[in-house]
């Protein structure tokens, strides 16, 4: 997913549908719609990715929506909530109706999907864990990582997930097969967002306190 302040983007002309703190964002390649989680607004904002036109808002029912990831093949998107409980709400792509929440760990922010295995992963910044949800059963496995995990991406081909841990200045590498941390990579100060380049097999990390 993309982590950005949508109100600073050229994609939208009118920021009024958005709250003052838009956090996670993802794109539905099938419909061209963009879903933005408004951390302080308690809602998802949906707009047209081509025109920037506002489509509508979706209410998840949970507090502090932080991350969103789209699973278009199954007509659902998942929203993480960075509250003291830590929840993930499945949302119907057609109706935007929320399903039953899945409890993970406190401070769920970054969220990613392993589509082949039907797993959803969350980075839980208040708990120093990554939660792995089995979509079929709603079962949750929690993995201890370095402090203040914020964002994560999944490389399905390699069978790995990469997690930024701002408190430690590291990226933790999780083996999806065993759900264990297999490596910790030192990066810059307070790494926050990250992106995956599958073509060149590279991970790009934004370090919020070192300007790199």
Image (cartoon, grey):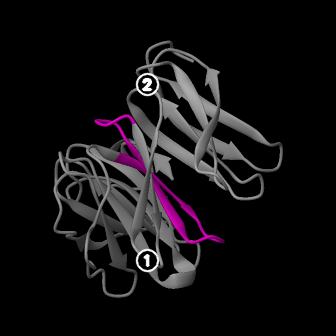
Q: Looking at the image, which residue is at 58% across and 33% down?
A: 172
Residue at image point 67% right, 45% down:
196
* Image depth: mark 1 or mark 2 in front: 1
What residue is pinned by disc 1? 137
Pick whichever of labels 1 and 2 is earlier in the sequence.
Answer: 1
| Distance in Å between CA atoms under marks 1 and 2 | 31 Å
Q: Are marks 1 and 2 in contact (CB under 8 Å)?
A: no
Q: Assign the C terminus to one quadrant of the image.
A: top right
Q: Main secondary structure of the magenta part?
A: strand
Crowd band around label 2 with a 10 angstrom C-alpha radius: few (<14), some (14–19), many (20+):
many
Does the rendering let one see residue 152?
yes
Residue that appears at 75% across and 38% down: 202
Residue 31 in view: no
Q: Nearer the viewer, residue 182 or 24?
A: 182
Asked which secondary structure carries label 1, the reply is loop
Is residue 66 found left or right of 171 in the rendered image? left
Indicate whether 22 appears above or below 29. above
Instruction: Count residues near mark 1 (Cα–Cα under 10 Å), then give few for <14, some for 14-19, many for 20+.
Output: few
Q: Residue at x 49, y 49 (%)?
A: 2
Which span is picked out in magenta?
109-128
Where is mark 2, residue-wise?
A: 166
Name the image quarter holding residue 8. top left
**Which SS class for mark 2?**
loop
């Amino acid at each position: 997913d993309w982590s950005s302040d949508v109100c600073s983007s050229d994609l939208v002309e009118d920021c009024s549908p958005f709250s003052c703190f838009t956090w996670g964002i993802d794109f539905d390649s099938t419909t061209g719609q963009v879903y933005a989680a408004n951390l302080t607004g308690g809602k998802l904002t949906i707009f047209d990715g081509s025109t920037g036109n506002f489509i509508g808002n979706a209410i998840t029912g949970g507090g502090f929506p932080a991350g969103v990831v789209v699973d278009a093949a199954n007509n659902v998107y998942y929203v993480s909530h960075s509250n003291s409980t830590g929840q993930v709400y499945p949302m119907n792509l057609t109706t935007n109706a929320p399903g039953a929440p899945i409890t993970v760990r406190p401070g769920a922010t970054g969220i990613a999907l392993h589509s082949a295995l039907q797993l959803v992963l969350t980075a839980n910044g208040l708990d120093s864990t990554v939660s792995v949800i089995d979509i079929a059963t709603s079962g949750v496995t929690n993995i201890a990582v370095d402090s203040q995990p914020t964002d994560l991406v999944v490389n399905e081909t390699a069978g790995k997930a990469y997690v930024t841990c701002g408190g430690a200045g590291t990226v933790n590498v999780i083996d999806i097969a065993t759900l264990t941390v297999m490596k910790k990579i030192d990066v810059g100060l307070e790494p926050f967002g990250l992106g995956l380049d599958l073509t060149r097999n590279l991970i790009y990390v934004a370090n919020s306190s070192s300007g790199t």
